[in-house]
Amino acid sequence: MKIITVVGARPNFMKIAPIIKSCRTSKVIEPLIVHTGQHYDEKMSDLFFRQLNIPEPDINLEVGSGSHAAQTAEIMKAFEPVLLYYQPDAVLVVGDVNSTIACGLVAVKIGVKLMHVEAGLRSFDRTMPEEINRLLTDSISDYLFCTEQSGVDNLIDEGIPAEKIFLVGNVMIDTLLTHKARAHKSSILDRLNLNNRKFAVLTLHRPSNVDNPVVFGGILDALEIIQKDLPIIFPIHPRTSRNLTPFNLDRRLEKLPNLHLIEPLGYLDFLKIISTAKLVLTDSGGIQEETTILKVPCLTLRDNTERPVTVEIGSNRIVGTNPDKIIHAYNQVINGRLIEPQIPPLWDGRAADRIVQIIIEKHSKSETQKPKPTRHYDSYKRTLATSRNEF
Ligand code: UD1
């Protein structure tokens, strides 16, 4: 069975690594890797392939940055001929980035089965680009693999047939558990001159936080207070970094001696600093999950989360972006007023194995059914050729 797996942006790499490994171990599924090139820097992409032992992509679409429309459209245009050439049995996409919906849409239009890993998560905030990507990808997927029960419930509420939905656990946590011991050996604490649990880690990249100078400035108001008490390490995302000068925030940051801006970190160094931090402040989705498994307090600088299990039983708290609320939540963590977090069901390091097992079972069943599902490769190629001639 041939499957094209798609990656595009940084959080995708941690999700695809265990899936590729399980496919290869199965010897039944031949996984091809298509990198859309949505993220392309050494620090945002290549380093992760090396550290997570992901094989070189079979194809890199090298699409790069752009507006949402341009980036999504470029990925679709570049992915279509790849799909027609390789003629896979299925396309597997992960997460909620533009590469996810772009490649998913190309697959279903050609009649190729679509599998979505991390399906069903909902923030119920349609101003988030990722929420739109999640809703659309789930609505066209054939197999939907969920990390937590809320994902299953959301999909059922949206009318997705139950037989397409599988609660399998969290592939991001598979990767974390695989690499935890290696990350433990990272020298990042020495390199940054940090002591165990004597610092906080901050990440920010949501457009709603960092593309708006008022919101970004408000978060800095809170950080200004917090860094007087606890040093903050801030590996800065390219989107966030790009906005500092136009928003006049670079000068403000220079005046905060304990807020340390550093380049984006590789997977192992980052895992080490979040494992050993006193707390993490973030607007990322995946980090809410990683801190939950590590039992490190996480303050999420957003008004909602699509990962409610991290709040219900994990170490996460949704605090929004109001400076007073951030400081209040910080003080609660420092004073130890958080309940002991638990590990969500099936976050045990075996999610990818479950996914691969389900794919193999479903595929062997569909192989015995006649007639075979229609894939429109040939007619589609003809249409493509005709339309090219016409235009
Ligand atoms: C994307 C995802 C987001 C994910 C995040 C992780 C979408 C809609 N958003 O957001 O869900 O959490 O990745 O990082 O898909 N850039 C570089 N080098 C790179 C990549 C990006 O400098 O390797 C800069 C470019 O200026 C680009 C900007 O970062 O314009 C934003 O990149 P983009 O892929 O558009 O979105 P992210 O904000 O990274």
Image: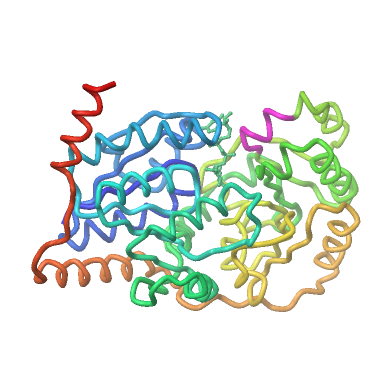
Q: Is residue 240 left or right of 326 when viewed as pictured? A: left
386 or 89, nearer to the observer: 386
Q: Residue at x 39, y 77 (%)?
A: 162
Residue 20 drawn above or below residue 157? above
Residue 174 drawn above or below residue 232? below
Q: Is residue 278 visible?
A: no
Q: Is residue 251 left or right of 81 when viewed as pictured? A: right
Specify the segment rendered in magenta.
236-243
366 or 353, nearer to the observer: 366
Residue 60 drawn above or below residue 185? above
| Prevalent SS, magenta region | helix
Placement of the C terminus among the 4 image quadrants: top left
When asked about the image quadrant of residue 385, the answer is: top left
Placement of the N terminus among the 4 image quadrants: bottom left
Q: Residue at x 67, y 41 (%)?
A: 207
**Rendering coords of residue 116 (x, y %):** 39, 59
Q: Residue at x 27, y 48 (%)?
A: 4
Q: Is residue 71 left or right of 126 when viewed as pictured? A: left
Say if the magenta span includes residue 354. Answer: no
374 or 188, nearer to the observer: 374
Ligand 1 rendered quadrant: top right
Say if the magenta span includes residue 240. Answer: yes
Q: Is residue 195 visible?
A: yes
Q: Residue at x 72, y 30 (%)?
A: 243
**Rendering coords of residue 91 (x, y %):** 29, 52
**Rendering coords of residue 155 (x, y %):** 48, 70
**Rendering coords of residue 194 (x, y %):** 71, 47
- How many callouts does the rendering have? 0
Please name the colour scheme applied to the rendered image: rainbow
81 or 344, nearer to the observer: 81
